[in-house]
Amino acid sequence: MGILNKLDNRVEQFESGNIIITSADKLLNWSRLSSMWQMFFGLACCAIEMMATSASHYDLDRFGIIPRPSPRHVDIILISGTVTLKMATRIKRLWDQMPEPKYCLSMGSCANCGGPYWEHGYNVLKGVDRIIPVDVYVPGCPPRPEALLEGLIKLQERIREQSLAKKQA
Amino acid sequence: METNEVYEKLKRVFEDGIGEIKTDVPVYPFFFVSADKINAVSLFLRDEESLQFDNLSCLSGMDYDKDNLAVVYHLYSYVHHHKLVVKVVIPKSNPVVKTVSDVWAAADWHEREAYDLVGMTFEGHPDLRRILLSEDWEGHPLRKDYKVPEFYKGMKVPY
């Protein structure tokens, strides 16, 4: 069974019943990382690559990653492109509207550190981590869909390690 | 029609409103027009039978030299398939140009961009607001003497 493989070593299955035993954390994390709803939001050329990743060839839907049009519905935000100072105030606002637990993936050089605009970009924020906490950085200009997928899988690994039962620092 | 022919034609109509012509330049030949005549000249360029510059390809603002700003107009005629470059030079102390947004609607946003980034004012423009930067941005970043601010709304700007 696919589910049992994903829940891996801490699952016990009984020979003759429809019963499995696992920890609440394992089950919750498995469901969370399998339905990382994404903010319907793109910024620059990275957004084109993000859309390509969403489309049928790479198909983000198979990871349960679906774009949602309201920040109240989403678990992750992909910062896919150049963050201008004008947009930065909006991103902060969107981030604040997202319910916990929430995650941020910074996609491409611009969102990571300002990219080619690091020196003369008078209106460019030099890294989105100056306004919101970033969980995963994906390098590239722009990153290929494979790179973005690896970043999202890294984020899944991070969620798998977390515990909702224990209070986080 | 070549630039010098257009120039001769305009010179006969507008006299002092038309400045000198530059043909020996590495770019496309151009001539100067005074800031208060540019609207009337534009209307003439658009409506005169032999000119019919019906398309404003580009309108750019620039920091021209130590004391002056400039607006550059790139025109094209889809009727006669000829093009023209016109410049208006204005002093930094009083950077005001007449708008051409009532002649070519395309000029509306172009003039807002030139105002936003270089900081000249277009007299008679229907809605002269910043178009790219935030409404509360201070200064005009494409001026040569522009200093990038340390912070914007608490966000550090330099790398």
Image: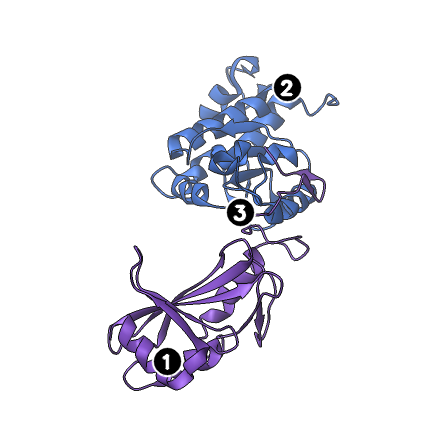
Chain colours: A blue, B purple
Instruction: Identify the residue position indicated by label 3 in the image.
Output: A41
Q: Residue at x 44, y 70 (%)?
A: B106
Q: Quadrant of residue B27?
A: bottom left
Number of other residues with Cα within 10 Å of mark 2, as a class: few under 14, some 14 to 19, many 20 or more: few
The Cα atoms of the two marked residues, 1 and 3, are separated by 54 Å
Residues flagged by tags 2 and 3 on a common chain: yes
Q: Is residue A64 above or below residue A166?
A: below
Q: Amino acid at mark 1?
A: Lys
Q: Is residue B14 above or below residue B158?
A: below
Q: Residue at x 53, y 47 (%)?
A: A41
The Cα atoms of the two marked residues, 2 and 1, are separated by 88 Å
Instruction: Identify the residue position indicated by label 1 in the image.
Output: B11
Q: Is residue A159 above or below residue A50?
A: above
Q: Are marks 2 and 1 in contact (CB under 8 Å)?
A: no
Element at label 1? helix
Element at label 3? loop
Q: Residue at x 59, y 28 (%)?
A: A135
